[in-house]
Image (tube, grey):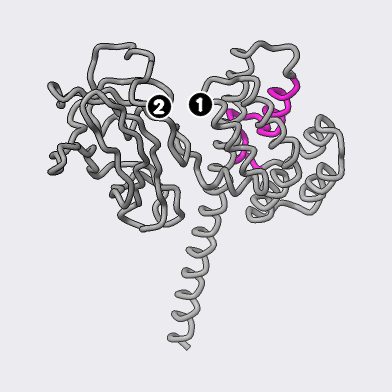
Amino acid sequence: MPDTVTVQPPKSPTKIEWKTFLETHPPESTVEVINAVGNPYHSGVFPVRKIPLQLYCDSEECEGTHWFDHTEGDVHLEDEKWGKGILVYRCRHCQRSAKVFGLYVHMVLKDEKVVTAYKIGEFPPFGPPTPSRVITLIGEDRELFLKGRKAEIRGLGIGAFAYYRRVVENQKNRIIDEMEKVARKIGAKPEALAKFEAAKKETRFSESVDAFKDAIPESLLIVGRNPLKLLHTALSEGLHSQDDTACLELAQSIRLVLTDLAERMSLALKEQKELTGAVSRILQQNAKKDQSTN
């Protein structure tokens, strides 16, 4: 970026903290920020502050909000010039997950307590975290899903809907497989399990959904409804019959149903595993008691 740059002025006169800006502010907008400037070097150049941040870590070990520490990168500020650079942060807990910010920052020396900051972007992308269980559920279409999530965050409804539709259509059988695993775990009868197999063989989405509707475990129903049927209903609206706003709402609904389904599957399998373990411990204890009385 050249030394003089035309940017959109902040929409609000409210100034936000540097830490808050990095943690919670979306890319591609200009904001007035306070407490962003560190002590100057001997050359008179100011660095931005590299303070610890609280960010979401998506590693299996963490999967939650943790402290991230700055590991590399800087942004140098001079009077009336745009500083540019990249800041890299790493999770303090697992030491694996990283967060990268691309930044432009403008400082006026006579008022170094306030800067104008522009977040070019960040990686992983800005927005609410995508649970790892959802990524596991959609399998090899992970990148398509994340592209849809990025489009959704930016308000690009048609793009988000198109990506999510491809994910659901591509991974229909995988989703049915995962639902079948839950059914097996809770002891579904062979005739119920056969319906899952029939659904996977059906090439038409609507027919596939109907083929196993009676075999779905109750714990996987969303508001009492077949989750795959809900997804099919959203997808059947089509791109050509809806405007961008309507597509965005449908895309959000598709993501929420997938997320809830993934959580329900994980919980059902976990509860069944814990229940099986509890029964096993009780039986072992009872067996020991019988042996001691003989």
Identify the image quadrant of the N terminus. top left
Residue 9 vs 119, above or below: the answer is: above
Horizontally, residue 261 falls left or right of residue 211, namely: left
Q: Which residue, given by chain and number where applicable, does mark 1 sit on?
A: 153
Q: Secondary structure at mark 2?
A: loop
Q: Which residue, given by chain and number where applicable, does mark 2 sit on?
A: 26
Start and end of the magenta stretch?
Answer: 217-236
Which of the 4 image quarters holds residue 221?
A: top right
Residue at x-position 51% and y-position 58%:
275
**Residue 68, image x, y percentages:** 31, 48
> Identity of the amino acid at label 2?
Pro
Q: Nearer the viewer, residue 76 or 207?
A: 76
Asked if labels 1 and 2 touch by Cβ distance under 8 angstroms, the answer is: yes
Which of the 4 image quarters holds residue 210?
A: top right
Q: Is residue 231 one of those drawn in magenta?
A: yes
Residue at x-position 24% and y-position 45%:
52
> Identity of the amino acid at label 1?
Ile
Residue 224 vs 49, above or below: the answer is: above
